[in-house]
Every structure is written in structure tokens, then in C-alpha cells.
Amino acid sequence: MKTQNLTLLCKLYSNASKYNINVRNSRYKLAVYSFVVLLICLTTLVSTSFYYLLALGVALISIIALSLFLSINNTSAITRSFILTATGGFYLAGSPTSYQLLAASRVSFIGCWLVMVPSESILTPRSNAANNIPKQLFIYRDSFSRQDFSRLARVIKQLGDVT
């Protein structure tokens, strides 16, 4: 009788420790690219002419426009989703390959840098060398909801604490 109850509790824990993480298109990515292009254009304008006031005005207007653009909540449609387990298991939706997050994954105020290897390469250490090369993925913070970002950050922090 105790074995059946224990099995049920294990199944409940197994189901409860999986998180469905939804990812949206990031606006930070567009803002970073726009800033780099603007910086190159302004550098060219200032270095080839003496229109410093024009460059200053364009820079000021661009900074205000980018800050207003980033202040609006990201309500775009969900573009990708994955399942994350409490132990760092990473299952992409629609992909037969599963991954394991490594302790080298990082979280910052800009986003998450995920370092992962296919789960099969962990189980078989003599597998193909190409499978042992870690895959890297950066996801901007505004691509997640607050709850999904905190779940991912918690799992990454736990991975770092274990090693």
C-alpha cells in the first residue's frame, strides 16, 4: 500500500517540476541593432563633416524614440515554446531532440545565455564528437513573461549551485 502512494507522489512531483516556457520575439534585439546602425551613421556624419549639432539632434531624438519603444509591454504572439524541468532538461516543442542545460548557462538583466548539450551525449560519453559540442542560445529578457523568466533563472541558478 505504501508503494502505491509513493509512486503517485513521485508522478505528481515529476509532473509538477516541468515548466512550459513561452518565448516571444524580442524588441531588445531590434533596439540593439538600431543603436549600432545609428552609432555607425552618426560616426560617419561627424567624421566626414562638421554637422555636430545635427548629429546631436539625431542622437537625442533616436534615444527618446528607442526608450519609448522599449517602454511598451511586449504583447507579440508566442513564437516558440519549450519545456524546462527542474533539473535543467530542455525540450523544444516539435523537436525530437532533448537537451540538458549546463552550469555554464548565465542570467543577466538583458537576458539568458543558455549553454546545453543533447541529452543523449550525456548518457553515452563515447558518442559522436559533434554531439558533445555545447549548443549556445541567447534569449532576451523581454521575450519571456516575468514568471517564465524567474523559473528559468531559478533552474540556471540551481545548476550553478550544484557544481
Image (spheres, grey):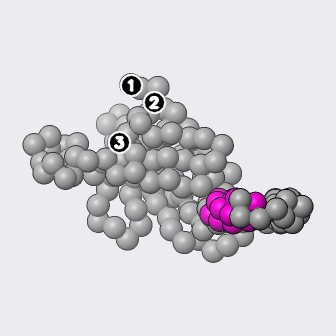
Q: Secondary structure at mark 1?
A: loop
Name the spot of residue 140 as percent of width and height, x first: 59, 55
Three-letter amino acid code of the residue under disc 2: Gly
Quadrant of residue 102 within the rendered picture: top left
Classed neighbour count for the residue bearing mark 2: other residues with Cα under 10 Å, few (<14), some (14–19), many (≥20): some
Residue indicated by mark 3? 7
User: Which residue is identified by label 1?
Assistant: 163
Q: Does the CB distance between marks 3 and 2 fall below 8 Å? A: no
The picture places residue 110, in percent across and down from the top left corner, at 64, 48
The numbered mark, 3 or 2, whose residue comes first in the sequence reads 3
Compare marks 1 and 3 and give the one earlier in the sequence.
3
Q: Which residue appears at 71% of the width and 64% of the height?
A: 48
Instruction: Check disc 3: other Cα within 10 Å, few if <14, some if 14-19, many if 20+.
Output: few
Which segment is the magenta one?
A: 31-46
Marks 1 and 3: CB-CB under 8 Å? no
Dot 1: within a 10 Å radius of its alpha carbon, few (fewer than 14), some, or many (20 or more) residues?
few
If the image is split into quadrants, where does the C terminus sit?
Answer: top left
Q: Which residue is mark 2?
A: 160
User: Disc 1 versus disc 3: distance between alpha carbons?
Assistant: 29 Å
| Residue reaching furthest to the bottom | 77
Q: Quadrant of residue 43?
A: bottom right
Tell me the element at label 3: helix
State whether residue 94 is above or below residue 1.
below
Q: CA distance from mark 2 to mark 1?
A: 6 Å
| Disc 2 and disc 1 in contact, CB within 8 angstroms | yes
What type is the residue that disc 1 sits on? Thr
Magenta segment main secondary structure: helix
Drawn side of residue 97 relative to residue 51, left or right: left
Q: SS class of the residue under badge 2?
A: helix
